[in-house]
Amino acid sequence: MDVRAVLEFATVTRGLSLVLQAVLNAAIPDHDADAFRPPRTEDSLYFDSMVEWLFGGLSHWDAEHFLFIAERGYLYEHNFAFFPLFPVILRGLAETLLWPLSSWLSVRGRLLIAVALGNSALFLLSAVALHALSRIVLQDRRLALLSSLLYCITPANVFMTAGYSESLFAALTFGGLYLLEKGFIFRACLALSIATAARSNGLVNIGFLLYLPSLHAISQIRLYRATTKGHSKVFHYIWVIICLLLTSVLGTAIIALPFCAFQYYGYRTFCTPSTSLESIPPALLSIAERKGYRVPDENGPPPLWCMRPLPLLYSHIQDVYWDVGFLRYFELKQIPNFLLALPMATLGIIACYAYFQANPELCVRLGLWDTSANKGLDKPTPGFFNPRVFVYVVHSAVLLVFGTLCMHVQVLTRFMASSSPVPFWISAHLLLLNEPLLHRRKTSNPNVQLHSRNSCKHTPQNPIVALLPHLKACSSTTQSILGYFLSYWLLGLALHCNFLPWT
């Protein structure tokens, strides 16, 4: 029933997003932004204008890069900032499922429909994967449900709907982490490896692969030590350590492989090119000359980054085209963008602080073992303060620090929302902790007493929908959290779909 509730709510929010972006895109004139807008080199067909009117808002800002790559491949150097899995899926949908429409729709039109259909399906998968992961980690059915329902109205909504890879990455990441928690290490590595083919920060998921099997190995050693005597212990310990090392090395290689392969492809494309300028359409070559976009040219000199000891195209692009680097965004003119990222950063800080306050000894021990005689990692306290949540809080903190110090900080909202379950877990935890209308018989933290209402006999299947009509009567915490989620959900559609600053 919980999964059904999540799927129903996710379906409703996806439908509303698609309808609202079309209405808002038609009602608000597009801003003349300095964004990537390649010329159309294909003739329009019968239904292209209608599809552009319905789904054109999904193609703005970085979405234009993904659509261009899906249509033309990696032509410009800065296109390599966008990883290939999502464009491959879009082109696959356009050439298979949507091929019967090729007489009425150009490739561009079919790609826009592929974005709408593909990201809607991927978002549903990501919501189900998040719910499954939440159930197994939090060990709390209601907290898992509420977290998943909050995810359905994520502040990063427009990026889950438009032609971005966030929904794809979230589905693969949450699904891979669920498989890892269940002990299916090889399948988890495959899922997380495919996630790395969608976004570069998939490399950070290697930390889960190194940590969770280590946790399992320590539990095995402790159990074997308590039940076995003699010299066989030593051989068992050695075997466990060897298995852990092999798992770590092979798993890391599998997850990192797509990133390395993509960088090699970029190196071959620009450092040893086999393409001549004559093969590039004149309109695309013209915009490259006007904008300063580098294209591969077998008759031209290789770019300077090819001469570096470690010629990583991705690092070069982030540095030159997007000016990404340590503290580079710390300028007075970027204060509005820091304010835009502040709510998500606040949730991340609250999650770290609350977890450390509830589990100081566990945090000092890095969550690797428990000295208590009555507690163990096999039967953790349910809820957000569960010991199994530790690695997710650390992962969230790493993303928060890196995103704040080394990235365009306004990206933090979608960066965190598609990579970590923690923003949704802490939001649901705070709602259950502070909202009287969400009756809860016991808290996940034994040191905290919740306000309860004995008159509440039945819990609505969708507590978010139940709270919305009574939002004015809710606690200030509920108003703040739901206000943040819903306002960003709507504002993102209005601004992003019209080339206004919401990236």
Image (tube, rainbow, N blue to C red):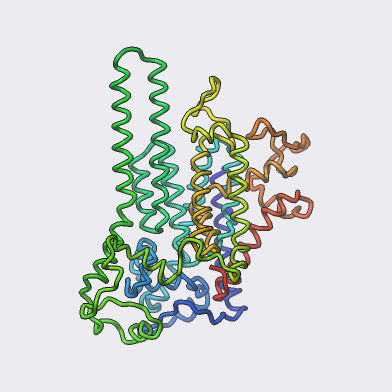
Q: Is residue 266 left or right of residue 86?
A: left
- 32 up-or-down from 252: above or below: below
* Camera-side residue of 271 and 138: 271
Q: Taking the image as drawn, is residue 338 in sight?
A: yes
Quadrant of the image occupied by residue 23: bottom right
Q: Is residue 345 left or right of residue 48?
A: right
Q: Residue at x 51, y 57 (%)?
A: 403
Q: Taking the image as drawn, is residue 20 in sight?
A: no
Q: Residue at x 60, y 45 (%)?
A: 351
Q: Residue at x 51, y 47 (%)?
A: 130
Q: Residue at x 79, y 51 (%)?
A: 473
| Residue 412: percent from left, percent from top | 54, 59
* Camera-side residue of 192 and 52: 192
| Residue 71: percent from left, percent from top | 35, 73
Quadrant of the image occupied by residue 313: bottom left
* Camera-side residue of 495 and 119: 495
